Amino acid sequence: NDQLMVVNDHLDKFEADCENMAHQLQTLSETHLSSTKMSLLEYSGMTIKETKQTLTGFQAVCDTTKRYSADNDIQCYIVRTIRKQGKQPKPERFHYDLPFTLQDIKNGDLQGSNSIFDATLDQVMKIQREANNKDVAMLPVTATL
């Protein structure tokens, strides 16, 4: 009987200890969860703040690029170039000295008496002799600059 009382006392103490440990574990878990919640809220706040700053920066970049104008950039480049190098000289008129007019070309009449089109080399040399009043024909050689 005494032994049974001792065992029951130990059992009661064991149950009380188990219940006490369960309460302590619950308190420890609640403390851990509360601490984790606070840390996550703080992290979330920092992330939201950084995200807002980043989005503000991205928005500024987008707004700036929308204000760019290729037309304006080209105009500015042209103005700077003209200021630096001066205006381009007007092109000199070039006369081809052809023996026919634009209307002759439109009419398909390129066979004038002194035309070099469809002419042989002998005919070209004859035309040049007659044009220059010389006995020796000169063969024109173009120069490339």
Image (tube, rainbow, N blue to C red):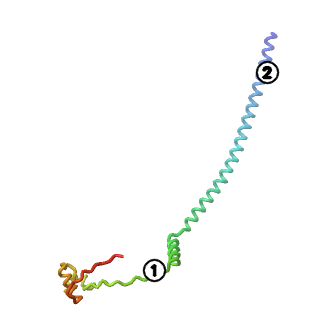
Residue 65 placement (x, y as % from top left): 55, 65
Left or right: residue 78 versus residue 26 is left
Task: Quickly name the residue at label 1.
Answer: 88
Which residue appears at 20% of the width and 82% of the height?
A: 125
Disc 2 residue type (three-letter): Lys
Identify the image quadrant of residue 108.
Answer: bottom left
- Is 61 drawn above or below residue 109 in the view shown? above
Task: Quickly name the residue at label 2.
Answer: 13
Left or right: residue 145 versus residue 39 is left
Return the residue nearer the eye: 30 or 75.
75
Which residue appears at 65% of the width and 52% of the height?
A: 48
Return the residue nearer the eye: 120 or 137.
137
Return the residue nearer the eye: 51 or 116.
116
Residue 101 placement (x, y as % from top left): 27, 86
Say few, some or many: other residues with alpha carbon within 10 Å of mark 2 (under 14 / 14 to 19 / 20 or more): few
Mark 2 or mark 1, whichever is nearer to me: 1
Disc 1 residue type (three-letter): Gln
Give the numbered dot on residue 122: none
- Element under disc 1: loop
Identify the image quadrant of residue 29.
Answer: top right
